[in-house]
Image (cartoon, helix red, strand yellow):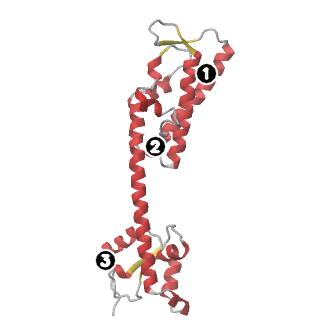
Amino acid sequence: MARKVVSEKIQANILCKCGRRCALCFGLNNDTKIKKGQIAHIDRDNTNSDEENLVYLCLDHHNLYDSKFKQTKNFITLEVKTYKKELENYIERQKNENIKYVDEDYNLFLVLKKYFIDSGILTKFKNFIFSTPYRLEEFEISEGLYGSDLINDYEDQYPEVNFKDSYLKEQFNIFKENYYYAESLLSYKYQNYNNDASHMVYNIHYTYEERLNHIEEFDNYRINILESFGKIMDYFNEF
Ligand SMILES: [Zn+2]
């Protein structure tokens, strides 16, 4: 009988469910890397193109499976079917995990965007000229507990606010640390000369050299703040 063409829909189903991982690599070696491969007929009958009879195999395993050599008898159909099913379950679990993480990370991103971008606070950081007076509340994010939680980790009392994704987590840690230092530097090097306790003026008693050091230190924090947040924004494609 002539070889029956596998419909595109069935091919797509097979490829999506295994994520282009080879069932034999997975079953035999616990190898979950994406492989170049082909769709093989489990019962070695080219005319039987039902989805249950098809499996994605890497090129090496496909050759081995279809070859007439004696060793291929080692792969019995039930074995391949079992690996195929286990691999599909594994891929399904991975997808669910990722979706959960992506949703949580995206929600945190929206919170950060609200506090740091929509509020205009990072623009103020970007344009800030050291030794000019400023209003304290322009650089404060501690509106309510959650706002200050974003920067300060109250380790014992509350769980740390952070991303699940390791790259985002790393960037956010850089952001938090530098934001914390930048904010501290401003409140420490500036003094309040106003009665309404809001207008901050750079302390005039610092020497010229000290002032240069303060500017340099602050600019380092500022660059790290803007770069790390830029990377988080890039990740979510909203820059
Ligand atoms: Zn393989």
The image shows residue 21 at horizontal and vertical percentages of 47, 70
Q: Quadrant of the N terminus?
A: bottom left
Q: Residue at x 43, y 76 (%)?
A: 84
Residue occupied by mark 2: 234
Residue occupied by mark 3: 7
- Residue 124 visible? The answer is yes
Q: Residues within 10 Å of mark 2 (few under 14, many from 20)?
A: few
Residue occupied by mark 1: 215
Q: Secondary structure at mark 3?
A: loop
Q: Residue at x 47, y 17 (%)?
A: 136
Q: Residue at x 47, y 75 (%)?
A: 23
Q: Amino acid at mark 2?
A: Asp
Quarter occupied by residue 118 = top left
Looking at the image, is mark 2 or mark 3 earlier in the sequence? 3
Q: Secondary structure at mark 1?
A: helix
The image shows residue 61 at horizontal and vertical percentages of 51, 80
Q: Amino acid at mark 1?
A: Ile
Asked whether disc 2 touches disc 3, contact meaning CB atoms under 8 Å apart, the reply is no
State the separation of the CA atoms marked 2 and 3: 39 Å
The image shows residue 111 at horizontal and vertical percentages of 39, 37
Q: Under 8 Å from ligand 1: the CB of mark 1?
A: no
Which labelled disc corresponds to residue 91? Answer: none
Q: Secondary structure at mark 2?
A: helix
